[in-house]
Amino acid sequence: MSRLVRCAGSLSRLGGMVLFALCGVTPGAAGQVAIRGDVVHTVSGDPITNGVVLIGSDGRIEAVGPFASVSLPAGIRVLQAAVVTPGLVDAHTVVGLSGILGGTQDQEQLERSAPIQPQLRAMDAYNPREPLVEWVRNLGTTTIHTGHGPGALVSGQTMLVKTAGETLDAVLMDSITTYAATVGAEAVGSGGGWPGTRARAVVMLRSFLLRARESLDRGDADGADLALLEGRRILRGEVPLMITAHRVPDILTALRLQEEFGFRLILDGAAEVGQVLEEVRASGVPVIVHPTMARHQGPLEQASFETPRLLHEAGIPFAIPSGFEPYFPKTRVLLMEAAMAAGYGLPFQRTLRAITLDPAEMLGVAERVGSLEVGKDGDVVLFDGDPFEYITRVCGVVIQGEIVSETCR
């Protein structure tokens, strides 16, 4: 039986007197829903035994604490689970541009007509009704950093969205979160203006940034050259450049470019980062690490299940994503990727942070998501056991106070 309990069916579990206190019929309760857990992981603080999260009618958290210390309005609906966590934040995916069918009709994550196109907006290609969005939501992911994927020198923009809602306006959190770029073999093509070698690829990327710098120095007004407009935003530090780089030479190239041009850099993938920990730590650059269970082949042949632990021990900020895969359906299960990191030595609380608060901080939305704190969005996941155990199921998902899933999966 699910450990998620509806208010109306809780008599045998909570006891008649407690049930009456929680499930009275007085109308006009201030809160929308309360989530009670045997253990509540706030992430920003210590776990709370027999805790409760109260979400108000505005979809924001009104109270978090031990059940005995939080006053719940009469008439409020109460959900219960063994373990309660914040909604999961996927640090990097292409879900919503990449779809569940895997055909040309739902693969919008990479435009190959030119190698550098920072002007391509993720919001123009995102489909909030894509079934793949629902699939990741039902497995606990409530916020995704999605958009154009690896495979071009600059493939386009990324954005942040919630995974519940049928229109872009309903789900959009941030319309331009990063510009997605790639350094390495994945960005090398043949013909059509594409580079044929790593050196040529970096020349092309540097040339783009140099033109943007010249435009910035001239004080050019925003005009018809949309690529340069976005390049100026990169150099002004308004939006980070997220560079996917797996091999050691490519990781170091990304760091050299950041040092030369001074833009904000997020290092993505970084399969061989364990070999250059000192250099990455000295740079202060955060890392969205490759999915732990990504196939260790091609540029990821030197990837390691221990990379998250190594980054943690080196004091390098990082987050774990569902990631991007060249094969269908181009995403992984975020919980399973985190569980593998935990199995290879990453402490439990640090693992949970890597899929909640750490990506939220890295991507600039920690004031809204990533932890269970008063004033933040009411995004909550309910589990019937340890979130990183293989047999544990997600038995409820709440996004901004709305119960979007109550089926154990």
Image (cartoon, grey):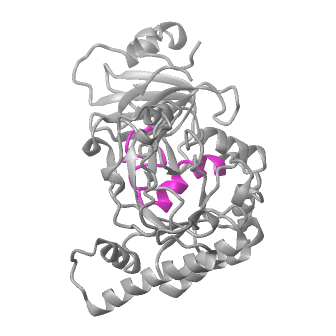
Q: Quadrant of the C terminus?
A: top right
Provide the major secondary structure of the magenta segment: loop
Quadrant hosting residue 182? bottom right
Of residues 358 and 51, the one drawn nearer to the viewer in this rendering: 358
Specify the farthest residue to the bottom: 218
Of residues 51 and 106, the one drawn nearer to the viewer in this rendering: 106
All told, the count of numbered labels is 0
Of residues 271 and 9, the one drawn nearer to the viewer in this rendering: 271
From where the camera sits, is residue 184 visible? yes
Left or right placement of residue 305 versus residue 112 in this view: right
Of residues 354 and 190, the one drawn nearer to the viewer in this rendering: 190
Is residue 17 highlighted in magenta?
no
Q: Residue 313 in the image: state x and y as whole percent.
A: 74, 63
From where the camera sits, is residue 280 visible? no
Instruction: Name which residue lies at 72% across and 57% down.
Output: 298
Q: Quadrant of the N terminus?
A: top right
Specify the farthest residue to the front: 191
Quadrant hosting residue 224? bottom left
**Magenta-highlighted residues:** 350-379
110 lies above or below 190:
above
Q: Residue 368 in the image: state x and y as whole percent.
A: 39, 51
Q: Residue 194 in the image: state x and y as whole percent.
A: 51, 70
Q: Residue 380 in the image: state x and y as whole percent.
A: 46, 36
Instruction: Name which residue lies at 65% across and 72% down.
Output: 251
Left or right placement of residue 55 versus residue 281 in this view: left
Is residue 367 highlighted in magenta?
yes
